[in-house]
Image (cartoon, helix red, strand yellow):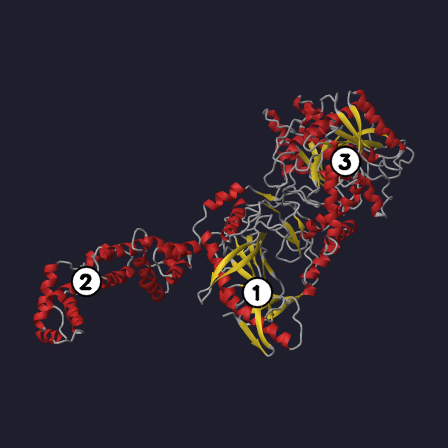
Amino acid sequence: MQGTDFTIAEGLRALDRREISAVELTEAHLAGIAALNPRLNAYITVAAESAMEAARASDARRAKGEGAALDGIPLGIKDLFCTEGLRTTAGSKILGNFVPPYESTVSAQLKRDGAVFLGKLNLDEFAMGSSNTTSAFGPVENPWSRANDPEKRLVPGGSSGGSAAAVAARIAMGATATDTGGSIRQPAAFCGIAGIKPTYGRCSRWGIVAFASSLDQAGPVARSVEDCAILLRSMAGFDPKDSTSANLPVPDFAAACTRSVRGLRIGVPAEYTLPGLAPEIDALWQQGLAWLRDAGAEIVPISLPHTKYALPTYYVVAPAEASSNLARYDGVRYGLRVTERESDLRDLYERTRAAGFGAEVKRRIMIGTYVLSAGYYDAYYLKAQKVRALIRRDFEQAWEKVDAIVTPATPSAAFPMDEKQDDPVTMYLNDVFTVTANLAGLPGLAVPAGLDAQGLPLGLQVIGRPFDEETVFAVGAAIERAATFTAKPQVMA
Amino acid sequence: MSYTLEGSTGTWEVVCGLEIHAQVSSQSKLFSGAATTFGASPNSQVSFVDAGFPGMLPVINAECIAQAVRTGLGLNAQINLWSRFDRKNYFYADLPQGYQISQFAHPIVGTGVVEIALADGTVKKIGITRLHLEQDAGKSQHDQHASKSFIDLNRSGVALMEIVSEPDIRSPEEAGAYLAKIRQITRYLGTCDGNMDEGSMRADVNVSVRKAGEEFRTRCEVKNVNSVRFVMQAVEAEARRQIEVWEAGGTVEQETRLFDTARGVTRSMRSKEDAHDYRYFPDPDLPPLVFEQSWVDELKASLPELPDARRARYVALGLSPYDAHVLTIEKETAAFFEIVAQDRDAKLAANWVTGEYFAALNRLKREVSDSPVSAANLGALLDLISDNTLSGKLAKEVFEAMLEADEPPASIVEKRGLRQVTDMGAIEAAVDAVLAANADKVAQYHAGKATLFGFFVGQTMKAMAGKGNPALVNEVIKRKLGAPSG
């Protein structure tokens, strides 16, 4: 039995029944990585040895009847999570061969629960991108391709492109990811898998390389909504080391996946019907709402009037925070240092950061520096904060009428690697449906719901109240059940 | 008499405000668990947070917040129940995060006021604009290597309180007195140790000059002045420089300057054009700092007595304003005095502490903090004076012996047989012997030479080896001689 096609729930059952061992599961995944990663480039670092060691230890625990919640499940870790003793790059040259002497809280909790780490997954540099083409370690390829143009290489989305591609290609059973403006949900949708960005504060940010601190949130991607729920339960929880983490109990998210949606009020925001929205995306959206109606939910038209300002607001707030967060990569203490014999400190900074950061990261640092500068702060940063408050209020008012909101996850299916690279603003439009949840701090789940005419996966998004991931899971699972999404990518282990 | 400086164009007034950086006394840093001990070996007190490692996050140290609130209360200032941390962005090798976490827009403490006492006996109020918390940077060392700079991050992340005054200061004396007062208050509160040599307290001095009745002119900021004396010197030196610039037809440019302590002048560090744009914005890693008034009230109730209140209490006990001032300057001195004066005559205690005791400290070059005599033993000595076991003179002798070995005075008295003689029979016998042996002088006394009285006292005390109770000796001699005639 190979086991790479198992969901996590299936894998756990098979391990429990001794139908497969953690060592066998891990070996199968490592074989898949060896075969497919040269093409997909989903992994930056493969940790074969430590993975096998962890798998053996897991089997030993299970033999003693001590198996934990995720014992023996092979996962990939987005290379934004610091992993103790395992190189962490953030997809950037500037971190050089940085090997963290500490483990991020989220990955530590997954380890605590017995997960096996296969390696570190590729991403857009510092999680800045929507196509996984800005990584210093090369682009990731989407394992899906167009039926009528199978040679055209497609992007997996970003920034968690490595995570989504690996899970879709069955070279990880699930993966950690992070989402600042859509970086979990957009690649999940592009790769035909599920992914949830939980409520801001649900998962600790401690040990995750920061992009935009007020928006960043860790979450899982996996091949089913239930798998996401299983992973999130391990990843989530209060962490006194992160002052923005929420001191709330972690519910049994997997149990919520079986809840009925009968009687739930599902909001459909008028503002998400964008001019020029692809008809098949709109059709899928309507289909998703019909499924929910059939399952007993009530569909309620709502308005989120400040939606159109979300993207520009995001592209002020996120770069502003990033420009400050990335100041620490200066060549002084760790990571890359580029210097000449006669260099002074300023020269060291300039050479190191010029060589260490890619074009998109530099662009955002410059935007962020600009919007925080004296004379521009009020017009950009402060204004953006005010708009952000209005966007948050839009949702607060919506929650008086509805229990969850359903929208498309992305404005398009996965696009070719050689498209949209010239104009950053076109690229930024990928996040149009997802950024609002980050700005408002809300949980958002992407669930695969159908295929476009080219056979590429399309996803729907479920947005919920703060810390009500359970309703989000219930609605997402209902869509998943109705959609019976069984399509598989062309490239998989 | 207000302080002015004479220039070639007339009389100038000095306007000054201070920004005092006071290191918070706390076990660990403002946002990390690393220790704050002074003088530890380089980079031995650094957490990954302090070193700006990827993914590291700040967590507010509650004790530092309490210390800032206590200080605010000591400055009679508004305590803000809602405040916020901002990032001050700039690049420097000893600033690992590339930003300093500070409180720019919403400080924890708002306006307050302190009183300073001046040499002419007047008391002046100096307004406090604000107190905010911020983290310290590390330390760059440029003298360790020919071509490299060394960085010590032990200080990185240590909590500082920046206490900003209103531009109410009008002379070097006031500037010095204000700094000394802030140091005194924080030391009483235990919120800053005030060790200026170790950099626990330093001041940025803002100085401008103006003619009487004018609006403020452009100010310059003299950075990092680290003693009361240097602050006084810097104010005068900078004021004189600015007067020269104005009087030569020039314009004082707003800039940051340094005080050259060796030459007693200020020199330019960076001009306004080179000033950083710090791009302050709220630190997204830290939610706003919010606490309850009831917590502030609890802290207020547990505050130690502050110097002004203590001085007033001493005056009420009958001490002279001068003694009350001298005894309260340093918290350790006041604490020492409290023990000496406990259940005793406060004036006697003050006389001994400010007299014999201070003189002994001076002579031995010791501080109250490493006192050669314990306050309890000094108090016991006062008891022996009060119960007439010792005369003042004998007490001084016992005190000298206590300086050698800090023993209870009673045991010194016993060992050396220094007990004062109050036995009237013994005193009368001694007086009789002295008068008999000096019949000629007795006659002279009776003839009107009243000054001989002291001679008889001296002779009697000598005969009694100094142990006679002086009051009784006086009384007996007076009675035996009767009044001189004439």
Residue A177: where, in percent of width, then height?
Answer: 72, 37
How far apart, in angstroms, are the residues tagged by discs 1 and 2? 56 Å
Chain letter for mark 3, please: A
Q: Are marks 3 and 2 in contact (CB under 8 Å)?
A: no
For disc 1, the marked residue is: B16
Q: Which mark is residue B471?
A: 2
**Quarter of the figure with residue A355:** bottom right
Side of A116 where A312 appears, left or right:
right
- Looking at the image, which is closer to me, A168 or B314? B314
Q: Which mark is residue B188?
A: none
How far apart, in angstroms, are the residues tagged by discs 3 and 1? 58 Å
Whether A358 is drawn above or below B237: the answer is above
**Quarter of the figure with residue A419:** top right
Residue A166 visible in the picture: yes
Chain letter for mark 2, please: B
For disc 3, the marked residue is: A185
Few, some or many residues within 10 Å of mark 2 (<14, 14–19, 20+): few
Side of A224 where B20 appears, left or right:
left
Rendered-image quadrant of the C terminus of chain A: top right
Which residue sits at x=39%, y=56%?
B334
